[in-house]
Image (spheres, helix red, strand yellow):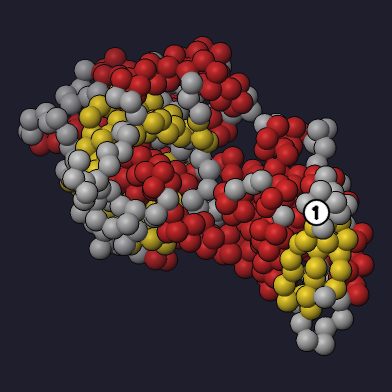
Amino acid sequence: MSDDATPVERPLAAIDIGTNSFHMVVARIGRGPGDGGGEFEVIAREKEMVRLGSASGDMKRLVPDAIDRGVQALARMARIAAIHDADVHAVATSAVREAENAEEFLSRARDEAGVEVEVISGVEEARLIHLGVLQAVPVFDRRLVLVDIGGGSTEILVGERGETLAVGSLKLGAIRLTRRFFRGDRLHPGAVDACRRNIRSVLAPMARDVERVGFEVAVVSSGTAEAVVAMALTARGDEPARTYNNASVTAAEIAAVVDELIAAETVEGRRRLPGMDAGRADIILAGALILDGVVRGLGIDEVVFSDYALREGALLDALARRRGANLHHLRDLRRRSVVALAASMDDEPEHSERTAGLALELFDATARWHGLDDEWRELLEAGALLANVGQAISHSEHHKHSYYLIRHSDRLAGFTDHEIELIALIARYHRKSAPKPKHTEFARLRPEDQEAVTVLAGILRVAIALDRSHAGPVEHLRVTSANGSGPLQILVTGRPGADLSLELHTGTERKDLLERVLGHRIDLVAT
């Protein structure tokens, strides 16, 4: 190998665990321009229609048969990835994030298929789809509205030059609305009108956000969009194509497809329509109505189809995380979303910023004792910045309100669902009761995550105490130990003329949890 040869990276496999289908793309990684960028060459694609979200009702549970199908599909995909010696990165969307028994699927995926699955929020799903679409459709420099219609949800995003201007995840999905409005084989009178009213109602808030920022071009992705585009192009007289990437169809052509689907009246009738994807015949009417409703509601004249979507976005995201060099952009995105949420709900963001800074200082100063890495450091900062958002509801029990607001926020971009849960718990335990196994959310964590959350809660409690006056009297701190095994001293340096007595007193009162998790007595000393 020559001195300037680039080492070969292992291939990556990204799996999109959707409500209707599982998709996997396996890619060989090239070294592209930029320090963390890269190009990829697809070497394998797999798709299975699993119908993971096939339960009746509003997708609150994954039924046993669906879990079995999902785990078996993941096992097959993992074997294919192994043939190519590829690292696997799997993300799950609406069906899993809404299911009360999601942990059953996640644990079986881990134990039986050997696949660790990350559950992502709707906003994170939209961000990753956007990332994937930008690799397939030349719209980076134009303001686009992106619409991705899945089985359980529809993601809508307005973006420009890779930045997100508006985003929403709506409970409008081809399977969800089929289960609600089109359960039988034959179309019932009034079902289409009822479905359209529901779509308009759910879409209305997002439509206002899109109107506020505007857009130049509309891009659609997903199997539903591809099926409708294929039918529209067939109606034009076009021949079937291997890919419809970058194909354009008008709003009028989409409406004509919907009319054709309605006229067919039965699932079997729809299955025989020209250009129809037979495997989608039972859910295509609901999916097409969503697309038609979004096009009408957002005032779209024409859409461009993207063959790339979540799986490619997840692949690129996994590549950035692996290389690390480009993680600063992801971390900037994540921190901006945390700061924006804090600014909208925290009456004293300056206090939260100070305590976050002190928490990071204390994290770094005690690293030899807790052994946590930089990923946990980032989650600590997020938990510290958001610890007081619950005061927007009530001061009493505001730590619990903070947990709820963080956990259910749709503003935290770049984080997985699991990471959001960890941030919410760090914030929840910044005061009052320490983490306990009887607390349901804490008990659901893996033991190593329970330990880390407890450490970070202990750090955050002391950091908050060191700004008890909300006046910023502490300039910096450091930690010493006489022999590495005896008591720890937190040496607190005050700003010139500052009175640290309240901070030291409160810190001493709130150090118990940190003492327990670090296994050392702690003394706070002014310097």
Judging depth in this view, the residue of 4 and 299 nearest the camera is 4
Residue 163 placement: quadrant: bottom left
Q: Is residue 131 left or right of residue 102?
A: left
Residue 178 placement: quadrant: top left
Q: Residue at x 25, y 31 (%)?
A: 227
The image shows residue 240 at horizontal and vertical percentages of: 11, 28
Q: In this view, does 27 lie to the left or right of 209?
A: left
Q: In which quarter of the image is the C terminus?
A: bottom right
Q: Tell me the kind of residue under disc 1.
A: Asn
Count the marks: how many? 1
Q: Which residue lies furthest to the bottom in this view?
A: 497
Answer whether residue 350 is visible to the viewer in this image.
yes
Q: Which residue is drawn at 31% across and 38% down?
A: 9
- Judging by the rendered image, the residue that carries numbered circle 1 is 483
Neighbourhood count class around disc 1 (C-alpha, 10 Å): few under 14, some 14–19, many 20 upward: few
The image shows residue 243 at horizontal and vertical percentages of: 17, 34
Judging depth in this view, the residue of 269 and 70 nearest the camera is 70
Residue 154 placement: quadrant: top left
The image shows residue 119 at horizontal and vertical percentages of: 52, 36
The image shows residue 344 at horizontal and vertical percentages of: 62, 66
Give the answer, above or below, for where 291 lies relative to 333. Answer: above
Answer whether residue 152 is visible to the viewer in this image.
no
Give the answer, above or below, for where 500 lies relative to 409. Answer: below
Q: Residue at x 59, y 54 (%)?
A: 378
Judging depth in this view, the residue of 417 and 390 nearest the camera is 417
Per the image, label 1 sits on a secondary structure element best described as loop
Judging depth in this view, the residue of 443 and 228 nearest the camera is 443
